[in-house]
Every structure is written in C-alpha cells, then in structure tokens.
Image: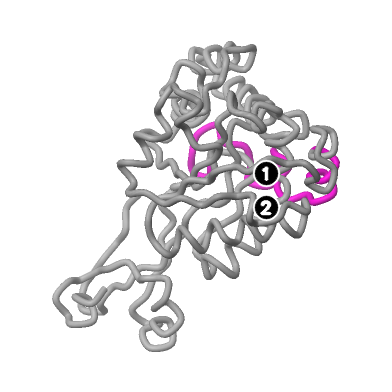
C-alpha cells in the first residue's frame, strides 16, 4: 500500500487500519472486487466439546455475520450461512439454506449439549493465522459467544501462527495436538459445488475436521457423477442443508464471502477477473 501511495505500483490491497482514511481521500481510485473466497471457523469434530453436534451448532448460530461484515470488515463482504457462494454452479441462493445467526437457537443447542448459559463449559483453543485483522475477527467471535451464549471470553484461549504453521497444526491426526477451532478460508479451484462440499468437507478429502463418512458423502458422490444439471442443483441444496441447516452436522461454520476494496490508480485501465 505504501508503494501504491508513492505511485510505484498500479494496484494494492488496503490495510484495515487505513481503509477509512483511504476511502475519504481516494474514493475515485477505489473499487470493490468479489473474489469468491469464503472464510470460516473449523471444528475438530473428534475433540470434546466439539464432538457434540449441539455445541457446534450453538457456536455457529451465536456468531452475528452481518454485524461482523459491517463493523469489523468495514463492508468488505457478504454474510454466508452455507459454504458455496454466488457464482459457483450448484450453490444455493445466498439466503435460502442454513441457519446463520440465531441466538435463541444457539442457546437452546448449547443447553441440549449440557451447558445451559455456558455453565461448566471447558476451556478451548482457537487458532488463527497471524495479523491484527485475524485477532479482530477472533475477538469479535469471543464477544458474540459471551453475549449470546454466556461463555466468558477467558475460556477461549487464542493462539496465532503463520498461515503455513496453522495448516500443519490443523492437519495433524492427533486430537491432543490439534486446536479445538481455527480460522481458515476457501477459494475455489473450479466453479462447481463439488469443489466446496466435496473437496473441502468430504470425508475422503484432506478432512481437517476428522469427519466420519456417512450418507452426506454418498450424496456428494451422487451429485458429482450426475449428468442432469437441475438434479445436481437440487442435490447440492440438500447437501448444504445437511451440513448447515437446523439439523446440520456443522464440521465448520461459514461466515462471509470476501468483497475486498482495491486501490487502483486512475491512470491504470484495470478490469478485475476472478
């Protein structure tokens, strides 16, 4: 960004701390670009207390996605309550599948897990990649869980690592070494739902969540091999619901799709391409 200000590069991302001042000073040299990257918190499904689906549902439904996008991300995104975003073949409409933010549902689910108002809830670790923006993200989640579930922020132990180290830490098969939760995002390799629910959440994928194979995976294979586009669309809506609906499995919880601001000098003719 410093190079951009000095006219040494044509385009640049804009640091969060600089965004408000930048928009005031350079609104005519700024564009917003959607890039199909969806960010989420992953759960270690084999590590208590997140081996309980009610706990996973509760932590997801207690996170206020719209306020996060508006206040913390400064408008650089759209809330997501299922995994695949608009622009991906087979992705359900953005507001039609998934629970999203529902504090009442969240409190009820945590009570079903045996932790009413978070009483008796154990200390857990949340691993994020490095940087102040990630810390802001995690601290917003802590505040949401305190307000909507009654969980004291002190029971959520924050750790931050370089991105490559986070990938290594979450890929371990040893539950004792793995974090309970972690920050991560996914940008597609190809514009089809299989690259999301299949390649990210499928039990035979890299599977950082340690999901066990079940009927959802059978449906993922069916949808991947189906030749009728409409049948595939219908199957993927069912699959996303089975992951993120009220009875969903929730190996992770999607939060937002990124629509970042980009600084572009007016002397540069630039057309972004996904």
Q: Residue 208: x and y, percent?
A: 46, 28
Secondary structure type for disc 2: loop
Q: Residue furthest bottom?
A: 25
Magenta part mainly helix, strand or loop? loop
Is residue 29 found inside the magenta-colored segment of the image? no
Q: Horizontally, is 52 left or right of 138 in the view?
A: right
Compared to residue 15, the image places residue 137 above or below, namely above
The residue at 72%/36% (across/down) is: 55
Q: Quadrant of residue 214?
A: top right
Residue positioned 62% across, 55% down in the render: 141
> Going by the image, does 169 lie left or right of 43?
left
Q: Where residue 230 sits in the image (x, y, percent)? A: 60, 24
Label 2 crowd (10 A; few <14 / some 14-19 / many >=20): many
Q: Position of residue 139 (x, y in %)?
A: 57, 60
Local packing at callout 1 (Cα closer than 10 Å; few below 14, some 14-19, many 20+) is many
Residue 79: name its quadrant.
Answer: bottom right
- Which residue, given by chain and number where applicable, does mark 2 sit on? 63
Disc 1 is placed on an element classified as: helix
**Which corner quadrant of the image does residue 268 belong to?**
bottom left
Task: State the mark number for residue 196.
Answer: none
What span is in magenta?
85-109
127 over 258 or under it: above or below: above
Q: Which mark is residue 60?
A: 1
* Residue located at (60% from left, 67% from top): 70
Extreme residue in the left direction: 8
Callout 2–callout 1 Cβ contact below 8 Å: yes
Q: Is residue 122 above or below residue 136?
A: above
Q: Check the image and report above or below for 1 versus 258.
A: below
Task: Say left or right for 273 vs 48.
Answer: left
Query: Residue at horizontal 50%, vertical 37%?
Result: 179
Q: Residue 69, image x and y in percent? A: 58, 62
């Amino acid at each position: 960004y410093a190079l951009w200000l000095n006219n040494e590069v044509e385009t640049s991302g804009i640091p969060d701390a600089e965004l408000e001042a930048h928009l005031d000073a350079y609104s005519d040299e700024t564009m917003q670009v959607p890039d199909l990257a969806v960010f989420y918190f992953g759960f270690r499904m084999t590590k208590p207390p997140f081996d309980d689906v009610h706990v996973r549902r509760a932590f997801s439904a207690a996170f206020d996605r719209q306020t996060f996008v508006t206040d913390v991300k400064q408008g650089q995104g759209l809330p997501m309550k299922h995994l695949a975003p608009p622009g991906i073949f087979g992705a359900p409409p953005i507001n039609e599948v998934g629970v999203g933010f529902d504090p009442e549902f969240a409190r009820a689910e945590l009570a079903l897990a045996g932790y009413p108002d978070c009483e008796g809830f154990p200390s857990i670790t949340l691993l994020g990649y490095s940087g102040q923006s990630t810390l802001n993200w995690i601290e917003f989640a802590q505040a949401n869980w305190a307000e909507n579930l009654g969980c004291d922020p002190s029971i959520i132990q924050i750790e931050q690592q370089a991105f490559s180290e986070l990938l290594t830490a979450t890929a371990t098969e040893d539950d004792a070494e793995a974090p309970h939760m972690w920050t991560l995002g996914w940008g597609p390799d190809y514009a089809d739902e299989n690259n999301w629910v299949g390649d990210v959440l499928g039990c035979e994928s890299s599977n950082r969540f340690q999901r066990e194979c079940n009927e959802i995976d059978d449906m993922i294979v069916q949808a991947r091999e189906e030749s009728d586009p409409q049948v595939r669309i219908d199957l993927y809506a069912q699959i996303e619901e089975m992951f993120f609906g009220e009875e969903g499995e929730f190996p992770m919880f999607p939060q937002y799709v990124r629509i970042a601001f980009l600084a572009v000098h007016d002397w540069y003719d630039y057309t972004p391409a996904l």
